[in-house]
Structure formats: C-alpha cells, structure tokens
Image (cartoon, rainbow, N blue to C red):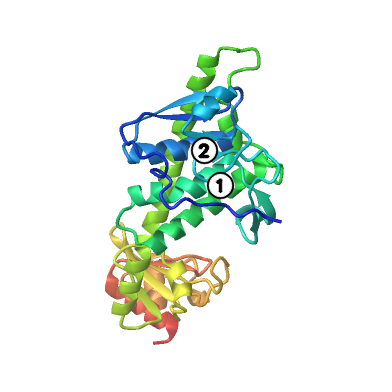
C-alpha cells in the first residue's frame, strides 16, 4: 500500500517563523547522487527566492541532525515539514499510471520527490507570480513527470539509468575519485553539481511557463481566426495542446517566421505523426517558380516533400495556399 505524503500548507515558514534565523540544512556526507543534489537545488532555490538565510552541513552525526531545521536523504524519518528521508520502512510511495520513459506502478519517493512535493510550488510561485493556481499545479506536475519521477525511480532501483550520458550520470561525475578523502573537496563538488541542476531546473520551468502562456495566446488567436479550420498565429508558439484540449477542428496553422510565412499541419493524435490534412501530392518538394506555377498562387516558396509544411512570401499567399489545400 502507498503511504500518503503530507504536503505542508506553508512549508517555508511553518515551524520556522524566525525569518532572520540562519537555517541549518543537513544531508548525508560521502558520495552524492542526483536525488540529494536535486533535493538541495530545489530547497536552496526556494529559500533563496524567499530571502531566507541558510547554511548546509553534510553529515550523519545524529546530534547535528537533531538540531537541524531541515533534513533530507538522511535521518530515517519523514514528516513532510522538516524531515525528508526515504530510506526507512514505511517511507512514502505513489502509484504511477503514466509518465515519460514508460515508468509505471508503485514508485517510492526519493528525497528529490519528497522535497519537490513540499517546496516545488513555492519555487514556481516565486518564479512565476502571474500564473494562476491551476497553471502552477500544471507546471509542478510537468516537472515531476519529466525530472523528478525518473530520479525517484532510479534511486529506488525501479529504473536503470540509460546508457551513455544522462541526468543521473552527469551528476555522478562531479564526485571526487575514490582515493580522494578530502571532505571540503566533496562539499565543493556537491555545490558545483547543484549549480548545474539549478540551471536545468530553472530553464525547464521557463519552458513550461512559456507553454502555459501560449495557451491563452493561442485561444485568443483562434477566436480571431475567420476560418476555424485555419489557425492564424501572430508568431510560432506551442499550439498543439490547446487544439486538442479545446477539441478544435483546426487543420492548418499559419504564422510568420524570418521574413516569410509558414503553414503547418496538425496531427490526428496529439503525439502522432499522421496529419489531419496534407498538402496536395503534386506540390511536394517544389520550390519557387515551379511551386507558384503548380499552385497558381504567386509568392509560394516551398512545400516539403512530406507534405506537412509549406512556406510563402506573404501572409496573403499563405492564406490562399491554405484555402486551396482545404478546397475553400
């Protein structure tokens, strides 16, 4: 059976009310992995964004652990507020139905998952204060599926790291060699690894924030498009999700790009390759005058031989090409 995870209502301040206090954060010493590096990255980012002073100690000393304000990946206890270990019997798990990379079934949390569940929304709220609650939860869930669940699965032996370089193996190379016993070197490498993970996390969040912004822009563009089969965008933006989420009958998408206009096709299924509508077969692979002659539309520049994208010189020629494709 899966244990329920307690998500504190105000994880940054509950029980830690003195905002001027330098918080003591503790994790284990020795070799580090992607789960504890990601945990520290999320936690330190949340605290930095909240202007909370803190220091980090990597140790297994129980006296220091007991004095700590926040403990992760060590200590043998999880309470969802300040203690975030996952090695003990009865540690939290969750049932996974669908994720990237085919992960499914009961997946125990690593410290990465526990810290993300407790502090991830704090990070998102600070980085994107204009997002509404629904959008913040969507962004949180996307990061969990894309980054966190694979980390949890690998750390708990439910998934093997891929061959070659991957998120986990990249972080592992920051560990000092086996015959390097200098703890200061290990701590320095831990912080170096965290900087890399912080950059990846922030960039991944920025991509998701942009995707969420595109939903509103796409819906506004659809409302203003005269022919609902043709979505007229002011520029390229992620548009496939809103087409399917809103069950639009859109077949072609027009947008400006680099002093030309492009016409894209729409897949039959969200992540499929088959298209709702392709350009006429006789147009495939043609360019310039040859294409303009075949289509009868001046300004036609190019149609891909796969018939899924076309390019024109002007907006007007793009609309004409789209309408002819649809038989309008």
Q: Is residue 140 left or right of 218 when viewed as pictured?
A: right
From this view, report whether residue 308 is shown above or below residue 156. below
Q: Nearer the viewer, residue 78 or 294?
A: 78
- What is the x, y in percent for residue 209? 38, 55
- What is the x, y in percent for residue 25? 47, 30
Classify mark 2: residues with Cα within 10 Å, few (<14), some (14-19) or many (20+): many
- What is the x, y in percent for residue 224? 28, 78
What element does badge 2 sit on?
helix
Q: Quadrant of residue 198?
A: top left
The answer to whether residue 275 is seen in the rendering is yes
Residue drawn at x 45%, y 43% is 201
User: On the rendered image, what quadrant is the N terminus found in?
Assistant: bottom right
What element does badge 1 sit on?
helix
Q: Is residue 240 left or right of 222 when viewed as pictured?
A: right
- What is the x, y in percent for residue 309? 45, 67
Q: Is residue 303 left or right of 17 when viewed as pictured?
A: right
Residue 38: image tag: 2
Q: Which residue matches tag 1? A: 148
Q: Nearer the viewer, residue 88 or 169?
A: 88
User: On the rendered image, what quadrant is the C terminus found in?
Assistant: bottom left
The answer to whether residue 297 is seen in the rendering is no
Q: Are marks 2 and 1 in contact (CB under 8 Å)?
A: yes
Classify mark 1: residues with Cα within 10 Å, few (<14), some (14-19) or many (20+): many
Q: Nearer the viewer, residue 15 or 265?
A: 15
From this view, report whether residue 272 is shown above or below residue 149. below
Q: Earlier in the sequence, mark 2 or mark 1?
A: 2
Q: Nearer the viewer, residue 113 or 174?
A: 113
């Amino acid at each position: 059976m899966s244990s329920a995870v307690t998500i504190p209502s105000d994880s940054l301040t509950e029980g830690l009310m003195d905002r001027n206090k330098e918080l003591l954060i503790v994790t284990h010493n020795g070799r580090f992995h992607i789960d504890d590096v990601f945990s520290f990255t999320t936690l330190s980012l949340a605290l930095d964004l909240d202007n909370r002073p803190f220091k980090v100690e990597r140790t297994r000393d129980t006296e220091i652990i007991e004095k700590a304000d926040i403990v992760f990946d060590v200590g043998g206890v999880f309470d969802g507020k300040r203690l975030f270990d996952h090695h003990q019997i009865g540690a939290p798990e969750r049932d996974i139905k669908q994720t990237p990379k085919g992960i499914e079934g009961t997946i125990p949390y690593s410290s990465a998952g526990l810290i993300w569940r407790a502090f991830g929304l704090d990070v998102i709220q600070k980085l994107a204060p204009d997002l509404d609650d629904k959008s913040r939860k969507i962004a949180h869930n996307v990061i969990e599926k894309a980054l966190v669940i694979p980390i949890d699965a690998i750390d708990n032996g439910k998934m093997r790291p891929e061959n070659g370089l991957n998120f986990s193996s990249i972080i592992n190379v920051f560990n000092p060699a086996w015959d390097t016993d200098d703890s200061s070197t290990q701590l320095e490498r831990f912080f170096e690894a965290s900087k890399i993970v912080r950059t990846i996390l922030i960039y991944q969040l920025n991509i998701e924030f942009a995707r969420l912004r595109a939903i509103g822009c796409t819906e506004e563009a659809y409302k203003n498009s005269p022919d609902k089969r043709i979505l007229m965008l002011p520029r390229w933006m992620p548009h496939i999700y809103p087409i399917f989420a809103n069950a639009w009958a859109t077949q072609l998408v027009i947008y400006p790009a680099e002093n030309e206009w492009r016409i894209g096709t729409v897949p039959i299924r969200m992540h499929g390759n088959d298209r709702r509508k392709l350009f006429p077969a006789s147009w495939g692979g043609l360019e310039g005058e040859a294409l303009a002659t075949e289509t009868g539309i001046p300004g036609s520049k190019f149609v891909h031989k796969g018939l899924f994208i076309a390019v024109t010189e002007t907006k007007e020629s793009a609309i004409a090409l789209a309408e002819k494709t649809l038989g309008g």
